[in-house]
Amino acid sequence: MKFSELFKIQRTSSDDWFDPILSLDTRLFIDPFLLYSTEQGHFEGSHKEVIAFFNSVFQLVAKSRGETSSVSWRKAVDLLRFGEVEEICLGYTGAGTGGLGSGTILARVIASALWEAIQAGLEEITHFEEVRILREGIGADRISDITAGLLRGRLTEYTAAVCQTHGVAVETVRYPRGHYDVQEEFWIPLEARLPRNPYNSKPVLLVPRRYLRDLPTISPEDFWEYCYSNENDTIRNDYSFDVTRNVDKKTIVDFARRHPDIRKKYVADVEKRKPEPYDFDRDAKGLVQWYDATARYCGQHPLSFLVTSQAEFLTAVETMVSEFGNYVENNHGWRLLWNDNRTPRREEAAQDLFLGIVKHYCKANDIDISREPNIGRGPVDFKVSSGHQLRALLEVKLTKNGKFWSGLEKQLPKYQDAEGIQVGYFLVVVYSENDLKKIAGIQARVRAASEKTGYTIKSVLIDARANPTSASKL
């Protein structure tokens, strides 16, 4: 459920806040560079506030000379200990809105990155997200959470203003780390009046859409693209092998550390650009439109189930899966799985679209569907259940995901064994005639895995070709 749905808000053109799904993180991030370039309203002076904090920590790290046992180092690590800002409902989390946050381990990683930046010639912080270029292990979600943590006071004021405008019920919330005092070098507590998220019992913090992107503007990938286009001779001189546009993070970090002058030129180049927030109307990554589109479809095509047995439960699951296929193939759902340039979207877009269909039907029939942790990297994507006994696992995969299919025989059965779940479904999404040629082989492997393990594993074809003509078949 979205924030606007829960509180029955009729949005107007003046509502510039992102409407979060309260039960699930959206894979968008607060981009510090957008704050730098477009400070408005409650967020005027926000970039200066963020940089003041990091320069304070930067000085502590410099004073420590990298000695992890020193008082300065330990104080820097303590200041960098940000928690997961679940209140914004943004990030990579696969299950719900609770991610890994930025605890002690990550605080040490960032402190180490700052020390390495100092050794690599960085004299002061102008854009703290630059540390991602100098150190592995700092993701876009961490940058977003740190930014939200540093600007918590501004976000609470912004959210409170929205709630007052729309008459949203609020309650008192206290944060031990609300505002950083640069002079005294400590956190000042904050008390605010915010709405409550019923799905995780946390407050809700709203974020202006103009500060959100699918990836931060300053990033290792963007830095390497700049270097590849402008510093190719230097790259060739540094590496004996033929370096391409697609390299691993380790190579990017290595190059960035060796060339502080190029890093400075890169940042100067970024500052000359006109940064763009995520285009919600176009939604090129398929991150947001799936929710409203599937809600409309499910409202127009309601399903009702009576679930009192395993057979009835599986019938309900298979009916919902079939309805997803019907939506994609016969009701233009496939349009949400293709980019404007006629290329297929990533696997996550298909997973989101499937989640939208099944989640709305599950809610209407008191059935639970949860997105499993490590989505896209773990053994399963979704778990559907009605009580503890009636459960099934579901995977949504593209035919081109060859790495996944090669691990089919081990991954799902192992998870079924651990969870005690007998039935699993594979939704195989095809985008082309070449994809269709792979189907027979995939279906044979699914059947073989089912026979070998003794678990029930079924494959389902979802035809996501442009203007498909066939319907899904269980």
Image: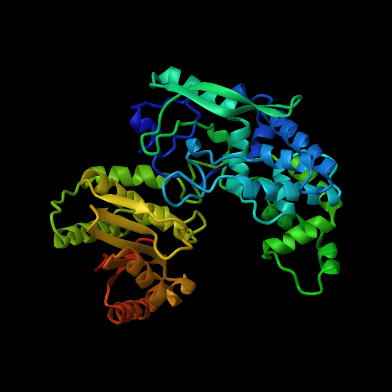
How many numbered badges does the structure rendering display? 0
Q: Is residue 292 left or right of residue 308?
A: right
Q: Is residue 107 left or right of residue 473?
A: right
Asked which colour scheme the image uses, the reply is rainbow
Residue 255 in view (yes/no): yes
Q: Position of residue 364 (x, y in %)?
A: 22, 44
Q: Position of residue 140 (x, y in %)?
A: 60, 48
Between 72 and 467, the residue placed more toward the observer is 72
- For the N terminus, give its image quadrant: top left
Q: Is residue 177 left or right of residue 323?
A: right
**Residue at coordinates 77% horizontally, 38% vertically from top-left?**
126
Between 241 and 122, the residue placed more toward the observer is 122
Using the image, determine if residue 266 lies above or below residue 153. below
Between 177 and 35, the residue placed more toward the observer is 177
Using the image, determine if residue 392 lies above or below residue 268. below
Residue 228 in view (yes/no): no
Q: Position of residue 311 (x, y in %)?
A: 15, 63
Between 220 and 435, the residue placed more toward the observer is 220
- For the C terminus, give its image quadrant: bottom left
Q: Position of residue 282 (x, y in %)?
A: 49, 45
**Residue at coordinates 49% horizontally, 31% vertically from top-left?**
205
**Residue at coordinates 81% horizontally, 70% vertically from top-left?**
239
Q: Quadrant of residue 458?
A: bottom left
Q: Is residue 410 left or right of residue 361?
A: right
